[in-house]
Amino acid sequence: RGHSVTPFMSHNLRAPVAPYGDSAPPPGYVPGLGRGAAGFTTRSDIGPGQAPVGSVQTVGGEDGEDGEEREGARGDGGEVGLFGRDAQTYDDDDAEADEIWASIDERMDSRRKDAREAKAKAEMEKFREGNPNIAATFRDLKRGLKDVSYAEWDAIPDIGDYTIKKKKLNVGFMPAPDTLLAKALAEKETTSALAEEKGGEQDLTAVGEGRGTVLGLKLDRLSDSVTGQTTIDPKGYLTDLGAQKITSAAEISDIKKARLLLKSVINTNPKHAPGWIAAARLEELAGKLQQARVFMQKGCDACPKNEDVWIEAARLNTPENGKAILARGVQALPNSVKIWMQAAQLEEEDERKRRVLRRALENVPNSVRLWKALVELSPEDDARVLLARATECCPQHVDLWLALARLESCENARKVLNKARETLPREPQIWITAAKLEEANGNEKMIDKIIARAVKSLKSHGVTIDRDNWIKEAEIAEKSEPPSIATCRAIVNATIGEGVEEEDKKRTWKADAEECMKRGGAETARAIYAHALDSGFSHKKGLWIKAAMLEKQFGTPDAVDAILRKAVTFCPNAEILWLMGAKERWLGGDVSGAREILQAAFDANPDSEEIWLPAF
């Protein structure tokens, strides 16, 4: 079948003829059955072993009674098998039972539905907590985007291209051969005839290009000066070229990297003032002062409420342009003390500086820094008036009260200090200044009373008397101009014993005096030794020796002799004090005086060998 027949055999073959011609055979007909032939069927004749649902097929392919019986055996439910329902036995009771059981299943499923759904929801939430969805994470931020205005959308900066993917190299690039480069160099260079005569060659083109490059760098640096200086010394120009700093390739690479980084900072957050300042200083370091000024101009526009931006922009510009920039700055920040102070410093004349500071005090009347700057620039009479106004605007600053008291007369200074003491009852400087005022006017009897009242008043207002701080105040009074020696002694007498136990007084006071001597406070140390000797330690020869060494180091020979004479009256049995006195007389050239001291020492200590030996 399917093969063609050759022409020479076509007359021996004929087409097969059906047993009944063109009519269909009867059902169940098997050819050759009458002569004993046995029919057979194949799998393709009977089809699959199980008929599909909804179709009934007999062996011959026709619908018949067997097919109807098989369809009836499946029943309405379409169930086939041992427990399948038969259409003949499926009645209304079975249908009603199926409906009842179906309603029971539905009811039981509805009872467990809420718990099942709640359990599934809880498991899903727990899973989302451990594995959050990116869309759910930013859902609140996306919801907030509805309030963004068109202007804010336009203000969002472009982050630029920050891809980390490797860019393809230009694989089609072919470097030029060395012969071509050598030929081009030979065509461009110029050789001097003078060099040829001397037997050498000199590339004048390369020399000219290098000199032009260095000259351009020099001119750019001079023209970009902050002060605006553009003059060039023609005589020292070539000499200065040798001192030019040539930036290395590594430094240039670092500058480029820093420039890219700061550009990213500025584009990402244009309201960040330190980013603008850092970018401007980088350009200034690279020698591009004009670009630095452009950056600071943009920074002033982007961050008008930052005072550092205005000050940096004024620093990078010329004085005249700096004044204009700071004028804009005080309009944006009228209460900025730093901008007002910088604007005053740019002025050259004192009168203009005072005018700027007065204008600043109109906007910031409680700035102590502005008041002090204005007082320093004003004459004495104007300064007195300004300080009187300053104490009204800033009554809690003791420096203003003390400065006003120094400028006033004695009587007015007392009134100022009394008013300051009422305003600031916890400030010890007011009392110390009052004591110095009385000493300066020759009223030394009031000094001890003022310091004693100061200690009592401060204690009553809850101020802790720190002995170390008061000793430092005594040293300051000693070193002031003019020195306030009486005030120094009064402070030591009133505060040296604060917080010191009775058994620790001698050791503590000796340590305090030695520390004062190391700092150069001789009068303070002298006052400490005098107070210790008058407080019951006059019989201690160690204190007398320390006092004598102090006078020997910082005092006069007469003072040493006086302290030793006083020492032997309290400690007559201390041979070392007698010997020290005799030695000082002998070193001073007074031999007879030394003998008199040794005679007195022998009378007080007749059996002392230490006195007999020096006498002989």
Image (cartoon, rainbow, N blue to C red):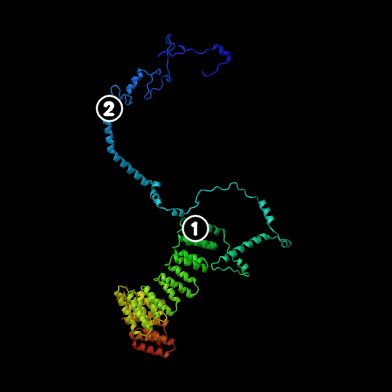
Q: Is residue 212 left or right of 531 when viewed as pictured? A: right
**Res 21 label:** none
Mark 1 neighbour density, 10 Å: few (under 14) some (14–19) many (20 or more):
many
Q: Residue furthest bottom?
A: 592
Q: Nearer the viewer, residue 73 or 328?
A: 328
Q: Quadrant of residue 462?
A: bottom left
Task: Give the residue at the far front of this rendering.
Answer: 150
Tell me which residue sits at (68%, 53%) in the image: 183
- Can residue 514 be seen by looking at this rendering? no
Between 157 and 566, the one lying in front of the other is 157
| Pointer 2 residue | 95
Compare residues 319 and 149 and report the one nearer the observer. Answer: 149
Of label 2 and label 1, which has the lower sequence position? 2
Residue 406 screen position, x and y as percent:
40, 80
| Numbered circle sitting on residue 262 | 1
Q: Position of residue 278 (x, y in %)?
A: 49, 61
Q: Quadrant of the C terminus?
A: bottom left
| Residue 531 x %, y % | 34, 81
- Mark 1: secondary structure: helix
Picture mark count = 2
529, above or below 208, in the image: below
Q: Is residue 396 left or right of residue 326?
A: left
Frontmost of labels 2 and 1 is 2
Is the residue marked by circle 2 packed among few (<14), some (14-19), or many (20+) residues within 10 Å?
few
The percent position of residue 397, horizontal first and vertical second, equals 37, 73
Which amino acid, by three-letter code, is at mark 2? Ala
Residue 498: image quadrant is: bottom left
Going by the numbered disc 1, the residue's amino acid type is: Leu
Query: Helix, strand or loop at disc 2?
Result: helix
